[in-house]
Amino acid sequence: LARGSIDLRRFWSRRFRRLLPASWTLVAAVVAVGLVGLWTDGQLRSLGGDVVFAVAELFNWHLIAEGASYGSSASAPSPLQHFWSLAVEQQFYLLLPLLLLAVVAVLLRWGAKAEAPAGRTARHHRMAVLRRLGLVLLALVVASAAANWWWAQSSVDRAYLGTDTRAAEMLVGAVLAVVTLRFGPVLARFGRGMRTLLAGGAASVLAVLVVSASVDAGWLYPWGLLATSLCTAVVLSACLHPGGTTRFLSLRPLVALGVISYGVYLVHWPVFLLIDERSSGLGGPVLFAVRAVVSVALAAVSFSLLERPVRT
């Protein structure tokens, strides 16, 4: 902000090195599994197109164009189906820096003309730019949430999968960042006990949403999705202060899981498709436990042999 610029190359380089090598390796592994005949005929027929859109980080729009009903049990799901959310995330990472660069450039020029006669300091000028940037991002949150609601009236899958309709949740994080830069940690005025209580309540709401939400739930669009992002923002804000939240989230098992969480997400869906009741003879909690252990083990290997070396 002080320079009026964003180092796009550095930002995108870090993002790409963090996300793409592991995801492309997973795509290659899914293709290899198909070559040995472990996917169904329907999954194999769609795999070619799925791979292209997964690698291009456009899988969500691929599903929308195909008219696929997310979560439908009518046919065997694609082993790359979970790449829709990675696509939304990557598209957001590509577009948000460009948007910020344009908005900040306009605000800096506008502010320089409007406020120079007032004799304001450079710090006051930057704070004014931050305030206006926050308002722009907040307006985008409202626009995205409105689009989410509007599409949900005619196509739940379009509302659920679209980058435009899901951007609000990530933009809430951008608003939180701007507010924190402008005013300091959001929960600083609360005592340690109140911060822990707020974070615990937000985490509890998140747990309820995860357990109760379904793709076709009308209340999800946009209110359930917004509630998810707002509760996450509360937990993140509490993490900026010492207290019960930071102590709990600093427990070694949670930290270890957080370190490999990206890899866990990548591998879990193909693992869940390959290890099912028919192939394993298991069911219920035992089946879930086996799937979870395999997913975590593969993610740990991926982090040690691929993700960390590429990043460092």
Image: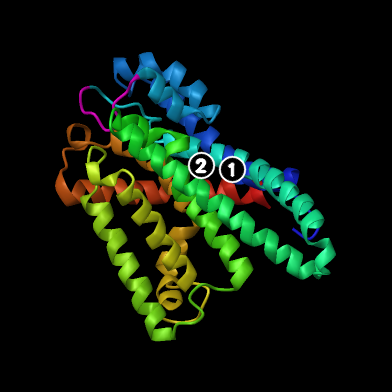
At mark 1, the secondary structure is helix
How many dots with numbers?
2
* Residue 202 position by quadrant: bottom left
Which residue is at the front of the view, 44 or 110? 110
Is 77 left or right of 298, judged from the image as shown?
left
The residue shown at (36%, 74%) is 198
Q: Does the magenta segment cover residue 240?
A: no
Closer to the camera, 228 or 130?
130
Instruction: List x then y, in percent, for residue 39.
Output: 32, 23
Can residue 2 be seen by looking at this rendering? yes
The amino acid at mark 2 is Glu
**Magenta portion: prevailing SS class:** loop
Is disc 2 placed on a helix, strand or loop? Answer: helix
Classify 10 Å Cα crowding around label 1: few (below 14), some (14-19), many (20 and above).
Answer: some
Image quarter where the N terminus lies is bottom right
Image vertical order of residue 75 relative to residue 162, above or below:
above
The residue singled out by tag 1 in the image is 93
- Of all residues, the one furthest to the front in this rendering is 117
Q: Are marks 2 and 1 in contact (CB under 8 Å)?
A: yes
Residue located 38% across and 82% down the image = 194
Instruction: List x then y, in percent, for residue 172.
Output: 48, 54
Kindly indicate the quadrant of the structure image that contains residue 270.
top left
Residue, disc 2 = 89
Q: Residue at x 81, y 67 (%)?
A: 118
Question: In the image, is residue 134 above or below residue 267?
Answer: below
Give coordinates of residue 213: x percent, y percent.
24, 48
Magenta segment range? 67-74
Using the numbered discs, state the Cα–Cα distance from disc 2 to disc 1 in whole angstroms. Answer: 6 Å
Residue 208 position in % (x across, y down):
24, 58
